[in-house]
Image: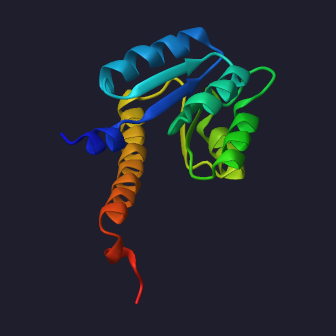
Amino acid sequence: MDNYLYDICRMTILCVDDDIQTLEMMRIVLSKNYPNQKLVFADNAFDALNISINIDPDIFVVDLYMPYIDGAKFSETISNWNVEKSIVMMSASSHQVLSKKCLELGIKNHITKPFDLVYLYEMLDNIMEIIFLKRLNAVKALKHPDHCKTH
């Protein structure tokens, strides 16, 4: 595989949850399903913001209810930095409560705890496919700039 294809296929996923058991479960299931992706974990939003400055994750999987900085404020901060970042909000709240909060925040992807792993994988796969296609189009535009000109 060409190096540029490997680079555009590799994603960084940052999981943020104050519940250590949930974070450990995420570490296990994501590392098994996404062995070629960079996985990073934080047990609070403050650390996650600091990590985000250094590694610029592609996808955030964030718990809604955390102490000090909750998932809503964290997501708002990330979106202010880069509107195109993909955020998956998770919560033990009812689906209706989570859906309403995500709608208010402009977050399209959300999942309730305990989550259906197949649904989580499908959601992450779809997000990664969108990111990959954007990157691939950017590479094509660099390699063939004449195709991007408007007449």
Residue drawn at point x = 26 percent, y = 39 percent:
3
x then y, percent, for residue 19 = 62, 13
Q: In which quarter of the image is the N terminus?
A: top left
102 vs 55: above or below = below
x then y, percent, for residue 142 = 36, 62
Q: In which quarter of the image is the C terminus?
A: bottom left
Q: In the rendered view, does 113 fall on the left or right side of 147?
A: right
* Quarter where residue 34 is shown: top left
Depth order, front residue of 47/65? 47
Q: Which residue lies furthest to the left in this view?
A: 1
* Quarter where residue 102 is shown: top right
Q: In the rendered view, does 9 fall on the left or right side of 83?
A: left
Q: Which residue lies furthest to the right in this view?
A: 68
85 vs 149: above or below = above
| Protein image colouring | rainbow
x then y, percent, for residue 120 = 42, 34
So how many labels did they put on this image? 0
Depth order, front residue of 85/25? 85
Q: In the rendered view, does 57 fall on the left or right side of 98?
A: left
112 vs 81: above or below = above
Depth order, front residue of 88/83? 83
* Quarter where residue 41 is shown: top right
x then y, percent, for residue 150 = 42, 84
Residue drawn at point x = 63 percent, y = 34 percent:
94
Residue drawn at point x = 53 percent, y = 28 percent:
14
Q: In the rendered view, does 22 fall on the left or right side of 36?
A: right
